[in-house]
Image (cartoon, grey):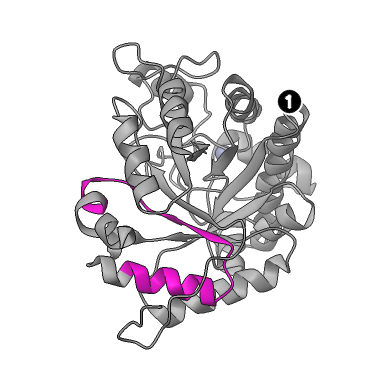
């Protein structure tokens, strides 16, 4: 058993360990090369982004398609995966309208379905695209249908929900949120958005309401997926610090676990600091309390060497993780990290 400079020892894999990687953009990928890479590194799973809040990388009846030369990427991916014995999970990023056609984005803005900042500006936290508002019924229905489509159109091993949360602290200040919050909390708003902002009289009520919006959506989506396909595994990517993410993003993933809505949890523990990394795993395992496997997301993109990655994988096993998913499969991963996994 190899020893590492910091004294960790490589430990045997637990039974059923998920050893996976995320892949961001499936358009035009050489799937045979990818699957061969994974198998050569002793990995068994891949989590491929097949849709966002505004685009599907396949022919979809819910979202606009963004495909390359008419290729059916999920079918090609699954065929190659089968040849190499790799499980494919379809990863969906909720709300974020990456690769959505501009007219699709503008229509959502026009219809008041995007998250707005406190001065009414369209919030664009990543890729310079709007993020759909989780409160709006049209958006909720679309996210649900997009996940059900993924769970029924192709024989994936699982579907993965990502970004079920508010895009940032405080959001959202759109008209639907204003109206729905006032109705649900049975309050009269005197000064919007001041009443619900930091120090405002309704700040705690707004925080609780924001969490309920996300929790109810997680329930709606997962129960629709279960009803459509009972054998489909459901996982979710979440932030590791439960209290912080509840407060800032309304994401109470412990409740999703406790109520049996997801089959395994993927906390994105993207830290190269060994003690922080293991503390997060310990805390997450404590919250999960053995109800579902904890498959940790590892920030491989932050690592400078394959040796460092191997050390972190050993740490994950020692801390009791049930598996890991590396972020993410790209040229850097292939050149710098993959060779170390093959050893
Ligand atoms: Zn809103």
* Left or right, residue 36 beside residue 227: left
Vertical placement of residue 336 versus 21, above or below: below
In the picture, residue 9 is in which quadrant?
bottom left
- Tell me the quarter of the image containing the N terminus: bottom left
Q: Which residue shows up at 69% across the image and 69% down it?
A: 287
Q: Which residue shows up at 37% across the image and 38% down it?
A: 35
Split into quadrants, the picture shows ligand 1 in the one at top right
Vertical placement of residue 268 versus 12, above or below: above
Who is closer to the viewer here, 263 or 109? 263
Instruction: Look at the numbered disc 1 and give the secondary structure of its residue.
Output: helix
Pinpoint residue 261: horizontal percent, then vertical percent: 74, 46
* Outermost residue toward the bottom in this view: 7
Pinpoint residue 16: horizontal percent, then vertical percent: 61, 56
Span of residues in magenta? 309-333
In the picture, residue 57 is in which quadrant?
top left
Q: How many residues crowd mark 1 within 10 Å: few (<14), some (14–19), many (20+)?
A: some
């Amino acid at each position: 058993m190899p020893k590492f400079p910091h004294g960790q020892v490589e430990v045997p894999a637990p039974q059923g360990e998920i050893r996976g990687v995320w892949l961001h953009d499936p358009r035009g990928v050489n799937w045979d090369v990818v699957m061969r890479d994974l198998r050569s590194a002793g990995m068994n799973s891949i989590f491929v982004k097949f849709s966002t809040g505004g685009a599907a990388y396949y022919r979809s009846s819910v979202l606009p398609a963004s495909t390359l030369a008419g290729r059916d990427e999920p079918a090609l991916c699954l065929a190659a995966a089968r040849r190499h014995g790799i499980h494919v999970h379809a990863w969906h990023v909720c709300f974020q309208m990456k690769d959505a056609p501009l007219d699709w984005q503008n229509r959502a803005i026009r219809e008041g379905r995007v998250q707005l900042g406190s001065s009414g500006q369209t919030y664009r936290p990543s890729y310079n695209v709007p993020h759909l508002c989780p409160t709006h019924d049209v958006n909720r229905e679309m996210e649900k249908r997009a996940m059900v489509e993924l769970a029924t159109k192709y024989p994936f091993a699982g579907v993965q929900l990502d970004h079920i949360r508010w895009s940032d602290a405080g959001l959202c200040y759109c008209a639907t949120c204003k109206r729905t919050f006032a109705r649900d909390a049975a309050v009269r708003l005197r000064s919007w958005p001041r009443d619900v902002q930091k120090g405002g009289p309704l700040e705690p009520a707004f925080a609780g309401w924001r969490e309920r919006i996300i929790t109810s959506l997680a329930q709606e989506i997962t129960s629709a997926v279960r009803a459509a396909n009972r054998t489909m595994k459901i996982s979710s990517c979440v932030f590791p610090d439960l209290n912080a993410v509840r407060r800032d993003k309304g994401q109470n993933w412990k409740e999703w676990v406790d109520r049996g809505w997801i089959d395994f949890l993927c906390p994105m523990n993207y830290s190269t600091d060994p003690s922080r990394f293991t503390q997060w795993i310990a805390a997450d395992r404590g919250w999960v309390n053995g109800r579902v496997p904890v498959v940790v997301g590892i920030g491989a993109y932050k690592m400078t060497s394959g040796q460092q990655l191997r050390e972190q994988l050993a740490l994950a096993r020692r801390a009791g993780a049930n598996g890991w998913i590396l972020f993410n499969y790209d040229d850097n991963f292939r050149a710098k990290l993959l060779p170390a996994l093959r050893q």
